[in-house]
Image (spheres, rainbow, N blue to C red):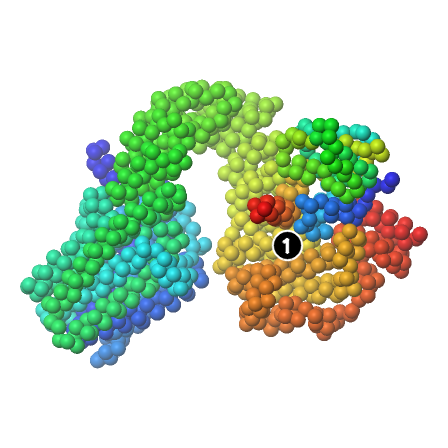
Amino acid sequence: MNALRQLWRSFFDIRPNERGRVLFMFLNLLFVLFAYYILKPVSRALFLTKFDIDKLPWLYILIAAVGGVLAFVYTKVAIRSSLSKAVLGSTIISIACLVILWALLNRPNPGAWLFYLFNIWVSLFSIMLVSQGWLVAANVFNSREAKRLYGVLGVGAVIGAAFGGTFTAYATKLFGVNNLVLASAFMVLMAYLAYVGLTRQPGVQLDRAKGADEEEAEFHFKDIVAAVVEYRHLQVIVGIITITYIVDVLVEYQFSAMAKANYQSKEQMTVFLGSFFGIYLNLITFFFQFFLTALVVRLFGVGGTLQIMPATITLASIATLAFPSVLSTASARLAEAATRYTFNRTGMELLYLPLPTELKNRTKAFVDIFVDRFARGLGGGILILAGLVDLEVRYVSVIVMVSCIGWMYLSAIARREYISTVRKRLESRRLDIESVRVSVSDPATIQLLESTARQGNPRQAAYALSLLEASQSAALGPLLDELADSPHPDVRAKVLELARKSGHAALLDRSLRELRSFRAGEHSPTLAPAVAYALTFSPEVARLARTLLDHTNDQVQESTVDFLADSPAVARELLATDWFSQCKSSAQPHRRRLAALALRGFPDTHHADLLPLLRDPDPRVAEAAFRTASVLQDRSYIAPMVDRLCESRLRGSALSALAAFGPRITGTLGDLLMDPSSSASSRRHIARALQQIPHQRSVDVLMEAIAESDLSVRSAVLRALHRLRETAPKLNFGRTSVSDQILKEARNYYELHAALAPLRQNQDRHKATGLLAATLEERLKATIQRLFYLLGLKYPPREVYAAYLAVNRGKAEEVSTAIEFLDNTLERPHKKLLLPLFDAPEHLAERGREEFGLQSLDAERAIRTLLDSGEEWLVCCSMAAAAELGIHSLLPRIQELRQGAGLEVGRVADMAVAQLAA
Amino acid sequence: MPELNLIEKVIALEAVDLLRNLTPDQLARVATIARELSVAPGDSVIDGKQQESLYVVLDGSVDILRGSDLLHTATQNEVIGAWSLFDPEPMSLTARTGKSGARLLRIQRDDFYDLLSDNMEITASIFATLVKRFRKLVEQ
């Protein structure tokens, strides 16, 4: 029984908290593929029975071109909406289109265009719903879960496809071919219901995910071409993929031609294609994927795996050439399609592996959007040329075989390039195996990683071990045993950490030895992993934990508490006792810190005990309390943490802890942000905390503060909004209020400019008037920065930022380009006020008069205005400047301001009054 | 002598090379942590042990010595111990006031760090100044 369970787990390792998600995702993919595998044979059968085979290459080209454009448009639209909206939208569109297509197909004598349209639409369906299904999966499971669970989900897809094909084969006679389109629409609806079930599972949050892969919508053709020219590795990838899709089209053509010759009616054709695509192809694919792919990769490596597809197709093509028939072409088609989705896909995924993540994502998007369609279009073009020279269908196999030889050659080069790139990336510790959604079992890679783990420098060795763990290599256990005695603490720490994660229990003695060796005050990277390991695998956890809590080394005690806090049962037994009472009121900060950490383990009974620890004068205690607060998330913890934002040593942890509470505390933070009795420093940091909560409520709260009178707070608020716009561009940034604030800031700029005009000639910063002029200059710069922050909330943020940098650098050519951009982008009221700031600064006074009625000022009136600004530093500078310039008319105003002024303003006022009165 | 007001402190701080890139607004914030200090003639300002403050000479003079050798006499607006804000290591020099004593403006390291942690733009400006110095040294 145990063996059976282990076998089951080796295939389907589903953890209890994943069951709901897996079930509904499985059903979603099953229904989507069910729908797709009805449409695929139906659309193709209708086309093949309607037209001669020579029209098929034109369909390939149309699908590549029109389907490509539609897919691109869909991606651009989807990226602007959330994934949940995209799923709902595409479900409604799909069902509506299917119903309309069904109605059109059932009209007497439907036009020829309808059959082209139907086939093109089916190609879009695969992007809208099938790719979207996998995109949902990518957002529901992280990459580690994906490695375990994608196999299960793949089974759902295969079952859906097989059911779809079988259903099509049997239902054609019952309902007629055209009516199957409605059955497909029903399956789309079922898929959506499964999706709704999925969204109700704990932890599933799809509102923030985008409706399409960002890279697919954002990549720039020019950048990718430049990268392809630069990297040989990419050239090989693009070459292989181009040949793959050309061969796909050629083999599919041969298969369709033979099918057309054998099956005359659309019913017969639909039944045949339904059985072929849905049942045979899927079952073979399933068999390859589950039982052969991993084995093949392990045995033959990346290069060998990539050779299998062209080699198999070559063999099948020889058969087609010798004995052209439905059987031989179907074998070629089976060999092509089944190996493409199994060996080749895994091989290609590994081939992408050593590329930098960003380049990898962009290249994949480029391949999906462009190379795929270009190659299929090229395949169609080759077939049209073949038709022009009356090449028989069987001889297309020759073109296929020649292409396969080129393909095998490229695969051999790919292997060399792959190894060389992996080595380079490993040396620079930039190999990202974690994010790859297949297990890396290529023997050359594994060997390279193992040898680096044994012989690399300690950091490289630890890194290689992490990669081996991420690759889910079977060889990890013996290697961990071997490296457990490494002289390097970093390596031993990694060994213990990975051994614990992978359930490798053979190092218990080693970890206990490690623990015994620690002395009081000693720090080592092995300390925390050794504690966690020993407590995980010890048969007597409670006894060992008790011993470790009395260890002479503080860090050992802390790591023990950290571990126990995550094991509530043991924590209650050991920690929620006298031990806790003694710790929380201990005079030793270290003991109080332990109490703060331990509270995570029994929140229900002692939640109020954290409050004094959050206010503890020792920053180490408070920091630990913040960590616990971020987990327990009781609202009463907010105020003590906000109070400590002004302490530089605690700020970082307080901000992280507050951000961990998420959107539910944005209202409280907003109240504090708007509270003028709080210090400006504290309010600035609250803006930073809100910036770390990418939610509409944060934006709303910050938007309320964009007109805040304190300039430092206003700048912090705008900076926070700017960052939020970058991290969560889909949030609504209240365009109207932003517009109003832009106009207010613009007016502020004109006013400052008018005040600076009579003082500008005072350049000496060792004099008060020079300081005042320099201050106003800086205020103008800061106003420009705030203006650009605001513009970034209303207009495209990246371009606005680029314009800001250009304006700041001040190079004539760049400024001119920035002005050109602003001229083309800004709305008229903004353009009218802002362009003169950069375009015609000499006319600002005139424009200020026209727009706001601002009069030219002399020094006396300018300083009088600034004395009334209410800003301490500006008032101080203005008083001192008035005294320095001997403007006696300002003496009464300065005396007036002296009343009730603070210490600094008072001292400067006394000095100014003394000078002016003398 | 009356205590310096904010404007006078800012003008004095303008002399500090390390703070050269700061705007007047930012210097005003530094000025709030600068304290005036009167040192009697011949008293020690820097004793060669751990140094935690920067000084600007407001009045009087301060002799900078290596052992008993006089290296320099710092007078009005000159700065002593600028690097001690960043480097806690003991200094190889000592400093003591001249015959007339000295009035100094002192910025302590802890206050300075607190200020930096609250004012990222001041930190960025100081980094920019330090980087310029390094670049100059490298180019030399």
Name the one closer to the observer, A870 or A474.
A474
Residue extending furthest left?
A: A323
Q: Residue at x 13, y 65 (%)?
A: A398
**Residue A568 at x, y percent in the picture:** 44, 30
Amino acid at pointer 1: Ser
Query: Viewer-proximal residue, A579 or B37?
Result: B37
Is A582 above or below relative to A191?
above
Left or right, A123 with respect to A279, comes to: right
| Residue B99 appears in the rendering | yes
The N terminus of chain A sits in image quarter: top left
Left or right, residue A488 beside residue B114: left
Give the residue at x 76% y 51%.
A873
Give the x, y percent position of residue B5.
Answer: 81, 45
Query: Residue A44 is drawn in which quadrant?
Result: bottom left
Question: Which chain is disc 1 placed on?
Answer: A
The secondary element bearing badge 1 is classed as helix
Q: Looking at the picture, how far across and down is residue A25, in whole percent?
A: 32, 51
At 39% across and 22% down in the image, what residue appears? Answer: A512
Is the residue A824 above or below the residue A570 in the image?
below
Q: How crowded is mark 1: few (under 14 residues within 10 Å), some or many (20 or more)?
A: many
Q: In the visual, does A404 lie left or right of A592? A: left
**Could you tell whether A718 is left or right of A153 in the image?**
right
Residue A48: % across, % down: 17, 72
Q: Does residue A164 appear in the picture of this structure?
A: no
A746 up-or-down from A907: above or below:
below
| Residue shown at 38% from the left, 68% from the top | A73
Which of B57/A52 is in front?
Answer: B57
Residue picked out by circle 1: A715
